[in-house]
Image (cartoon, grey):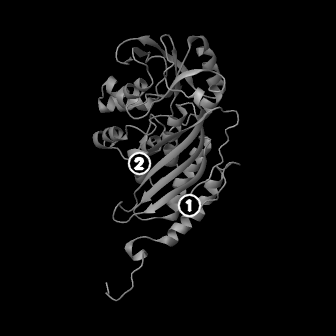
Amino acid sequence: MDQDKRLTYKDAGVDTKEGEKAVELMKPHVKKTWNENVLAGLGSFGGLFKLDIAGMKEPVLVSGTDGVGTKLKIAFLMDKHDTVGIDCVAMCVNDVLCQGAKPLFFLDYIATGRLKAEKVAEIVKGISDGCVMGKSALIGGETAEMPDFYSDGEYDIAGFSVGVVDKEKVITGQNIKEGNRIIGIASSGIHSNGYSLVRKVFFDKLKLGVHDYIEEFQMTLGEMLLTPTKIYANACEAVLPNYDVNGIVHITGGGFFENIPRVLPDGLCAQISISSWERPQIFAYIQKHGNIDEMEMFKTFNMGIGMMMFVDESIAESVLETLKDAGETAYLIGEVVKGDGRQVIL
């Protein structure tokens, strides 16, 4: 390069004009998530959200942050970017719901090697779709162009969710007791955990590609693997105002064995009947072709149950019916028993 040439930011790999174009393309997607509590337009230094705490004695803010993980590699291979944003929202909002909170707003962070406005707009479309499902306003975010840090064509996404709950209604699991029934709410599939093992099975062992058609799934492998994570805002909205729920579990990274004990009081165990629900076919396929032990599957995947609610036996059937009336597929999958070490018994 001529030493006398004046360098620009674009010469270093950052195209600010493309960034401005991306903001214009994403605006319609962002605005569809807004409600009367959003006070500042897109582009402000900070997102402003009016806190409606009418009827609450001691409002408590509940927050959660997460990303999508290696599921993004499937999006890269498929060159399909309009669903992984749903996964990002789901991983954050579902955690916030576990404390009994009502989701309020969401922020996103997208980092990429070379910014392409149309691709970023696709990602944000998925995030905004997830925010609609998660009853959250998308009030801001950041798109970072980082040449030489991310490979061209690759990116990462992270999100941050905030909800609110009255302190006396915070769900911690401390009210779970022996005899409580466990209600499982169906997942949409793998969700966004365990994809390192998924890729090992499909790509390394079976030598399949994302565009290969899988007869058992009636779709390509890539389409199946990009099925978005289910968001449980509707389920919680139907149940929480009407029933006392003692504990809620989001079955995320670590499967049954890491997540269920997080809500169990000392001396209590969750006894799960693994024959009480219908597992999505994808899990049997992974287990068979990966030659994976049953316990390893339950340590890694949601196995068809994305969220669990712990309730008193006297209201279990009513909660189950309420969930079904709300359009959810739900099952009575177990109960709480005495035991040592907050174990999960399958």
At label 1, counting other C-alpha atoms closer than 10 Å, the crowd grade (few under 14, some 14-19, many 20 or more) is few
Q: Quadrant of the C terminus?
A: top left
Taking the spot 42% from the left edge, 26% from the top edge, the residue there is 262
Dot 2: what SS?
helix
Height in image: 163 above or below 119? above
The answer to whether one can see residue 228 in this image is no
- Report the residue marked by disc 1: 45
Among the 4 quarters of the image, the one containing residue 204: top left
Height in image: 61 above or below 342? below
Report the front residue among 187 and 156.
Answer: 156
Q: Which mark is residue 74?
A: 2
Residue type at mark 1 is Phe
Residue type at mark 2 is Ile
Name the front one of labels 1 and 2.
Answer: 1
Find residue 112 and report its horizontal and vertical position in percent. 42, 60
Find residue 328 and report its horizontal and vertical position in percent. 60, 28
Taking the spot 34% from the left edge, 89% from the top edge, the residue there is 4
